Amino acid sequence: MGSASIPVDLVNPGQVFACLGFLEAADSLCGPAEGGFGWDETPRFDLLAAGAENPVAYVLEFLTGAKVTAVAPDGSNIAPKFGIKNEAGGGDIFPRREPKLDILPARLTDSDGSYIELAYWADDEACGRDNVKFWGGAAGYSGAARTRDLLNAYQSLHGDHRTEAFADPLNVVAPLSNGFRLDWRRDYTTIDLGFSPDKHAGITMIGYPIVELLAAVGLQDARPMRVSRLHYQYAVWAGRLPPMLARAALCSRVGAFPARFFSMFLGEPNRFDRSILFAQEETQAW
């Protein structure tokens, strides 16, 4: 049983979701895993897994060697786009009534055939879950293409920088053209003064690719609780839990686990997207 502990900002929702993503990925890639938060001094996320000496490093090494494909239902005849190959999903199951290119699940696969999938953005009201999809437009630029861009941003880092990420992965920065809008440190909302970064090709945006990727993994089977279109709530739990219980703890409404509770608020930088503006801690359970 190996363990790792990483710093986390509890009022950054993307970092909290990414911690759950590390737990989900470790459980899938290297054996049974447990994870949870501690905040006696500096807030941290503790992760244990049976099949890796350092489960955080194991997950990051997987990302270093992974490639991205889009997963399409058998017989869907959806043509590949944005330089992302399609592969058959092995059946006609899809989380949405109508499979569309921009929301096809993304599959990350390494040379050993190990893989994890990202598809939280494909859910609709028929699933009974909010898809927490904050991005849109961009000529239908797909979730799989955004996953590829995030993965490329991490893989483009110098080897020493990737190794340094083992100790503090949620603060690793890289030039980043696209993402899922899950980390407010890169995001923006317009202030109607005639300036927008996406209109200036000479400006390189810096983002947090590990946060965005692992947050997407964390949201695969767990969601923050939606209060309104621009207001969500989430919780962080004390002590280690397996993934199934951690998913429930993230949106716990009844204080079933020792926890702290937070609200996150969104803005609308344009007519296609929503953007995390800030989060604040609540004084009591919802």
Image: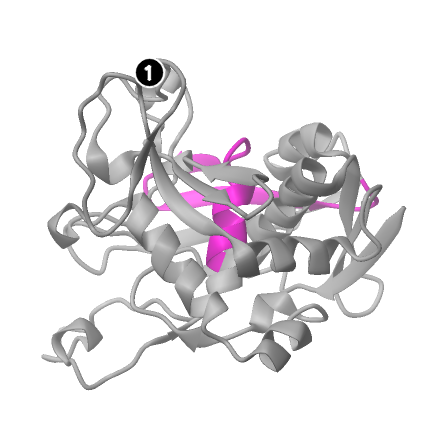
Q: In the picture provided, is 45 more to the left or to the right than 64?
A: right
Q: Secondary structure at mark 1?
A: helix
Q: Position of residue 169 (x, y in %)?
A: 62, 67
**Closer-to-camera residue (138/81):** 81
- State the image quarter where residue 50 is shown: top right
Question: Residue, x 63% and y 59% (percent of image)?
Answer: 61
Query: Does residue 168 show up?
Result: yes
Residue 180 position, x and y percent, is 36, 53
Residue 12 to residue 30: above or below: below
Residue at 32% of width from left, 77% of height from top?
Answer: 205
Q: Position of residue 138 (x, y in %)?
A: 15, 54
Asked if residue 139 is positioned above or below residue 152 in the image, the reply reads above
The residue shown at (72%, 71%) is 167
* Towards the viewer: 44 or 56: 56
Magenta span contains residue 32: no
* Image vertical order of residue 56 relative to residue 110, above or below: below
